Image (cartoon, grey):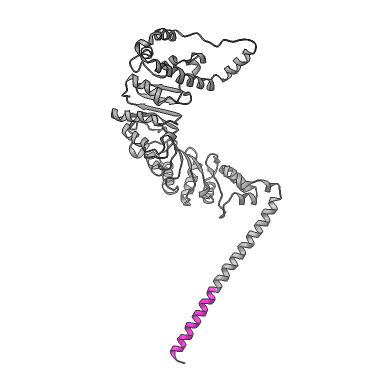
């Protein structure tokens, strides 16, 4: 037999062997598939049997999306059915909300077990507090297991003045274990330096809708840099509070406000201890931009100075902030809200009864004329009839409505009951100050 014939037979045998190997591989795959089908059939039988029981009537798979981590753990321990219903296809625990109810006495091993068996994509909200070692254990386990929290939308971090391992773990979490620009709500508390805020914000700023940063422990920061207040085009609520006054360039703030895609949808800008400073032209641009915030319910801004005349500040109240009832404007701050501020005197202390709320009294209370170097009487008399009518017919009724909804509800009900037995006068005497203004304003046409 020639060499060529032998080689030909060898090639033929190799082809047959290859075909047999392919058939064996196909049969193994079919076998594995049949075994998996068998397992699924057994599980379906068990599931149907469970459904007929009392426990089986509980819709765990729907309930679990509203449960905290401790609830999911209890569900899993309750029965095989509950464990299956609160797990994904790979058997990992579906835990949408983590941190609010951590067991304070949980061991490091327990928290690492949770991190290892967690379905990272199921997490929607995450709350971590450095005051509890459990939070640190969980972060360490999460990072070691390489979990990616791909579905998280809301995060709350309390660093509790920790400047060491916890803050480093949080930074690693945001940089390596959360997809960039996916978090919509972020609350950062108790950080020792504003620089740490910049690191975290750089990973999520384009998706953020609600940002709350409060109380840097060290305080005395020089100023807020661009990276510490990055572009946030979707922001709707911006709360930036600090332990001590921190400078913010008015030009930077104007730039960031104009980068917001939908200014009328902004609900809140709260910067009480951030002093907005810089060129007067930039400060004016920031203030004029407030007119576009037609949907906001709270504006709290502090300035190094407000380069406006008294007349312009009065116009700011009646034009730009006309949709908000609770307002206070001075020579260096603007506060305008839909509700009465907690740090103000009670409304009943300002106006003992709703009848005291007049255009004159609101004009006097909502603008700090003394800080502006004048007084309310003089400025009221300078208003035209049209401007006075605006305070009487538009602004004062707005304040009255707030008064009735917040502090006079019970009084109104009591007055209604008393009226059933006879007439009741709710008029109140005019204060000495109001009488003076009323008398002087009788000749207001002279000043128009």
Q: Is residue 282 above or below residue 61?
A: above
Residue 43 located within the stretch drawn in magenta: no
Residue 424 image position (x, y, % from top left): 59, 10
Relative depth, front residue between 410 and 51: 410
Relative depth, front residue between 231 and 151: 231
Instruction: Give the dominant element type of the magenta stretch: helix, strand or loop.
Output: helix
Residue lying farthest to the bottom in this orientation: 1
The answer to whether residue 404 is left or right of residue 373 is: right
Residue 423 image position (x, y, % from top left): 61, 10
State the quadrant of the C terminus: top left
Residue 311 image position (x, y, % from top left): 34, 19
Residue 336 in sight in this render: yes
Please tell me how many numbered marks the rendered image carries. 0
Residue in the image at 45% along x and 20% along y: 395
Residue 246 in sight in this render: no
Relative depth, front residue between 176 and 210: 210
Residue in the image at 34% along x and 40% along y: 227
The magenta segment: 1-22
Residue 8 located within the stretch drawn in magenta: yes
Residue 431 image position (x, y, % from top left): 46, 9
Q: Is residue 20 above or below residue 371?
A: below
Residue 235 falls in which quadrant of the image? top left
Residue in the image at 51% along x and 10% along y: 428
């Amino acid at each position: 037999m020639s060499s060529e014939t032998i080689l030909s037979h060898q090639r033929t045998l190799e082809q047959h062997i290859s075909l047999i190997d392919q058939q064996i591989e196909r049969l193994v795959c079919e076998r594995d598939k049949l075994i998996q089908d068998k397992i699924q059939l057994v599980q379906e039988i068990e599931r149907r049997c469970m459904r007929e029981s009392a426990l089986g009537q509980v819709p765990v798979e729907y309930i679990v999306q509203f449960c905290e981590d401790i609830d999911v753990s209890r569900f899993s321990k309750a029965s095989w059915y509950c464990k299956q219903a609160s797990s994904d296809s790979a058997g990992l625990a579906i835990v949408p909300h983590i941190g609010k109810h951590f067991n304070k006495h949980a061991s490091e091993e327990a928290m690492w077990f949770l991190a290892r068996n967690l379905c990272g994509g199921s997490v929607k909200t995450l709350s971590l507090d450095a005051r509890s070692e459990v939070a640190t254990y969980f972060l360490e386990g999460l990072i070691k297991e390489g979990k990616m929290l791909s579905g998280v939308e809301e995060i709350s971090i309390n660093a509790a003045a920790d400047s060491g391992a916890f803050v480093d773990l949080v930074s690693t979490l945001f940089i390596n274990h959360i997809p960039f620009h996916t978090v919509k709500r972020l609350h950062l508390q108790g950080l020792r330096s504003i620089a740490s805020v910049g690191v975290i914000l750089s990973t999520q700023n384009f998706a953020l809708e609600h940002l709350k940063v409060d109380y840097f422990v060290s305080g005395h920061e020089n100023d807020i840099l661009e990276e510490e207040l990055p572009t946030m085009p979707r922001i709707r609520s911006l709360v930036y509070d600090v332990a001590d006054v921190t400078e913010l360039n008015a030009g930077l703030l104007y730039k960031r406000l104009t980068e917001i895609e939908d200014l009328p949808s902004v609900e809140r800008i709260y910067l009480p201890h951030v002093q907005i400073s810089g060129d007067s032209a930039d400060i004016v641009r920031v203030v004029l931009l407030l007119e576009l915030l037609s949907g906001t319910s709270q504006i709290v801004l502090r300035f190094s100075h407000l380069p406006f005349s008294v007349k312009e500040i009065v116009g700011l109240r009646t034009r730009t902030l006309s949709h908000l009832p609770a307002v206070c404007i001075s020579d260096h701050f603007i506060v305008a809200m839909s509700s009465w501020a907690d740090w103000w005197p009670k409304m009943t202390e300002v106006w003992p009864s709703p009848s005291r709320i007049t255009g004159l009294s609101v004009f006097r209370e909502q603008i700090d004329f003394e800080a502006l170097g004048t007084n309310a009487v003089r400025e009221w008399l300078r208003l035209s009839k049209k401007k006075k009518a605006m305070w009487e017919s538009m602004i004062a009724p707005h304040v009255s409505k707030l008064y009735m909804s917040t502090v006079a509800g019970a009084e109104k009900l009591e007055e209604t009951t008393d009226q059933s037995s006879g007439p009741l006068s709710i008029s109140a005497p005019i204060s000495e100050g109001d009488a003076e203004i009323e008398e002087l304003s009788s000749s207001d046409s002279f000043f128009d």
